Image: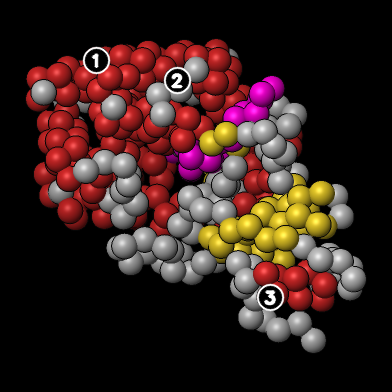
Amino acid sequence: MLSPLVNVEDPASLAAYLRATGHLGSAASIRVQVLGGGVSNRTVLITGVDGGAWVVKQALEKLRTNIDWFSSPERILVEAAALKILQVLAPPGCTPALIFEDPQRFIIAMQAVPQPHENFKAALLQGHIDAERIAAFGRLLGTIHRRGWQRRAQIRTLFSRRDFFETLRLEAYYAFSGQQVPSAAGFLHHLIERTRARQITFTHGDYSPKNVLLRPERIILLDHETSHFGDPAFDIGFAMTHLLSKAHHLPPWRARFVQAARLFWDEYRRACGDVPWAGELEPYAVRHTLGCLLARVAGRSRLEYMNAHERALQTEIVTRMMPHPPATLPALLEEFVAHLAASA
């Protein structure tokens, strides 16, 4: 009988589990490599299984952060559903194929992304700001949002559950940041309420360079457990935050990161096309960018590459901008960088 206690980071436990569930032959052996970078799951790469290499993920109830952070491991089932639907919403090859899901043990397996590949976040932090990759990053999100809206009846049904987005994003990012920075609480409370009301299309909820692998021919999107039917402006602000925070952290490449942020937005709009909500998107994207810029230095999940001085400065700049948000994303970029320059 299969024990309910499985730890996929333990090779013996994982091999026993895969044999008991019929995913590994009795005589086969596997090699297991623990993959880092995430806080919400145990994630391993296994080789030696039929079909080549797999990535196996097991959701954690208590996330691996310095600040206590809890979320039901049932969110792994949302990721499984997202892996299936993204085969339709995203261009071919831009998301891994799902191999199996185990709802009882909160485990999924997906096809591993073949080598060679590079993590987008790591490349950006090294100053490798490639315009083609940035453009693809914007186009992919715009395509997913447009196709999600075109299939909104199906998406609304499949991704009606929003509690994981609530706990992992709205509470952990916005509500918690409002507690830490009281001057931002009113702005963030209003943003939370508007986000809950704006249910428009498939929203990834974790659209970050950390969750993108760069292949020679395409980019590949990972980590879909906060996917839901919601506000596409959140994904834009979430992604913009990573480009602007790196512009803050890496002054020698600041101008290039700002240019990358403009390119991301331009390519997103082209890929998104003439959806009926496009005209009202930008003001909300501005507000989510400000909210996420604060959350990544004051929320439960803080950017590990920023030091205390950078976190304090980003908090000061963003809270100064919140009472009168810029009207457009290009204006936000200009104002944010002007504040950085003034503080130098």
Residue 218 falls within the magenta-colored stretch: yes
Residue appearing at x 64%, y 42% in the figure? 155
Magenta region:
198-220
Would residue 226 be visible to someone looking at this image?
Answer: yes
Residue 58 position by quadrant: bottom right
> Mark 3 or mark 1: which is in front?
3
Q: Split into 4 quadrants, where in the image is the C terminus? A: top left
Q: Earlier in the sequence, mark 3 or mark 1?
A: 3
> Mark 1 or mark 2: which is in front?
2
Q: Which residue is mark 3?
A: 13
Q: Which residue is mark 2?
A: 129
- Pinpoint residue 258: horizontal percent, then vertical percent: 33, 17
Q: Earlier in the sequence, mark 3 or mark 2?
A: 3
Q: In the picture provided, is 75 more to the left or to the right than 116?
A: left
Q: Split into 4 quadrants, where in the image is the N terminus? A: bottom right
- Estimate the spatial distance between the alpha carbons at disc 3 and disc 1, rounded to whole Å: 52 Å
- Pinpoint residue 165: horizontal percent, then vertical percent: 46, 51
Residue appearing at x 26%, y 41% in the figure? 306
- Estimate the spatial distance between the alpha carbons at disc 3 and disc 2, rounded to whole Å: 41 Å
Residue 161 falls within the magenta-colored stretch: no
Q: Amino acid at mark 1?
A: Glu
- Judged from the image, the secondary structure of the residue bearing numbered disc 3 is helix
Instruction: Count how many numbered circles sit on residues in the image.
Output: 3
Residue 149 position by quadrant: top right
Q: Amino acid at mark 2?
A: Ile
Give the vertical position of 308 relative to 88 (above or below): below
Q: Which residue is mark 1?
A: 334
Give the vertical position of 280 relative to 151 (above or below): above
